[in-house]
Amino acid sequence: MLYIDWLETPKSYFNNYNEMEKSGIMSRGWVPTFIPVSAINIYEQHSIDSNWVEMKFEYDPSDIQSTRKACDSEIPIEKGIQFFCTYFGSSTEIKLYENGEGTLHTPVN
């Protein structure tokens, strides 16, 4: 059972955005291209069965323009901004904090 869970919810780590892009995970639709290009120390997990994605990463706080342009709306949150986006028909929430930490979450379908 543990092996099946691992296959259905794979986890990945990438040193930076370019490494993640080269892996093909973005072209397969699991990770949006509009997270900050400066992202490093990227931890990603997704569910093949229910199509959710969770990410944690670090980024340069001045690098938010691609996220801002791609998302539908944003609201200020404590020490950061929460963006609401649509990606492959799914709601996606990205939180970018002033300290250079970021998260991405898509709800379970």
Image: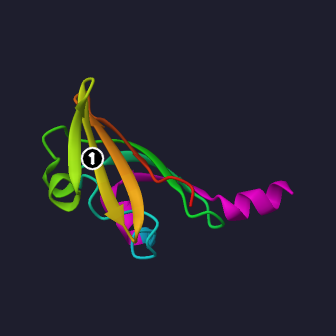
Q: Residue at x 22, y 29 (%)?
A: 98
Q: Is residue 42 magenta?
A: no
- Name the one closer to the observer, 5 or 105: 105
Q: Is residue 21 magenta?
A: yes
Q: Is residue 27 above or below residue 44?
A: below
Residue 41, by quadrant, is top left
Where's residue 105, x and y in %? 45, 49
Image mark count: 1
Q: Residue at x 81, y 60 (%)?
A: 3
Q: Residue at x 66, y 66 (%)?
A: 49
Residue labelled with disc 1: 83
What span is in magenta? 1-22
Where's residue 33, x and y in %? 30, 65
Q: Is residue 78 left or right of residue 57?
A: left
Which residue ends up furthest to the right in the rendered image? 1
Q: Is residue 5 left or right of residue 109?
A: right
Tag 1: amino acid: Phe
